[in-house]
Amino acid sequence: MSYIVGMKFRIINLTDGSQKDCSFQDLSKCLSSNCVILRVKEEGFQSIGLVTHQTLVFFAVEFAHYALQNYAKKKSPEAEICISLVRKWIEDDTSVSNEELRAAYAAAYSAANAAYAAADAAYYAADAAAAAANAANAAGSARSATYAHAHAAYAANAAADAAAATTYAATAAAAAAGKNKLDEQNRQATFILNFFGTE
């Protein structure tokens, strides 16, 4: 691994201005929608990248896919369908309805009893996509003058749901790794840094 496990990061939420510090191992669990990742260095900060709704969902589905491919004891067609549907949503968020996403994650969740942690990660990836889709729909609705305040609040709640679902996907994928949990957390952090082209 080319990254130093002792790296520290600061996550700044651009919506509410909140900041939190996290370790390399916890990076995948500390992200939120509309946040900036900064690497803490002796001489200040290095900007890593901006995390959007789509980025959160992408991370969640990739963590779930990796867990399903590498840690599941048996195949889970429900989780695989769920991952496929979420990937379709990532490519075009109008190509999949919220109902389809919710049905997919319900099926993946039901299958979680058979391949618990890996299927659970897929369930949370779909949940992140559905929450992000809800946030996008609510944000679009907020542009209409009549109920702008209520839709803006709904968009904020949906964005928080997307962040929580992504955290759950990362946690479930790490749990699926069993005794290799720390390695999986490090792999997730490396994946995030590679996504942003950080060397």
Image (cartoon, rainbow, N blue to C red):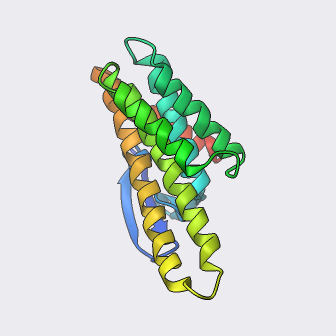
Q: Is residue 3 left or right of residue 115?
A: right
Residue 118, above or below 49 = above
> Which residue is the extreme one toward the bottom?
145
x then y, percent, for residue 58:
58, 43
User: Residue 18 versus residue 175: which sits nearer the camera?
Assistant: 175
Q: Is residue 173 visible?
A: no
User: Residue 62 versus residue 104: which sits nearer the camera?
Assistant: 104
User: Residue 13 versus residue 42: which sits nearer the camera?
Assistant: 13
User: Residue 64 versus residue 82: which sits nearer the camera?
Assistant: 82
x then y, percent, for residue 17:
45, 77
x then y, percent, for residue 51:
57, 57
Residue 165, above or below 161 = above
Q: Is residue 151 left or right of residue 184?
A: right
Identify the image quadrant of residue 76. top left
x then y, percent, for residue 141:
61, 74
- Kindly identify the residue that appears in the image at 45 percent across and 14 percent down: 75
For the C terminus, which image quadrant?
top right
Q: Is residue 17 left or right of residue 148?
A: left
- Kindly identify the residue that appears in the image at 42 percent across and 58 percent down: 161
Residue 164, above or below 169 = below
Q: Is residue 148 visible?
A: yes
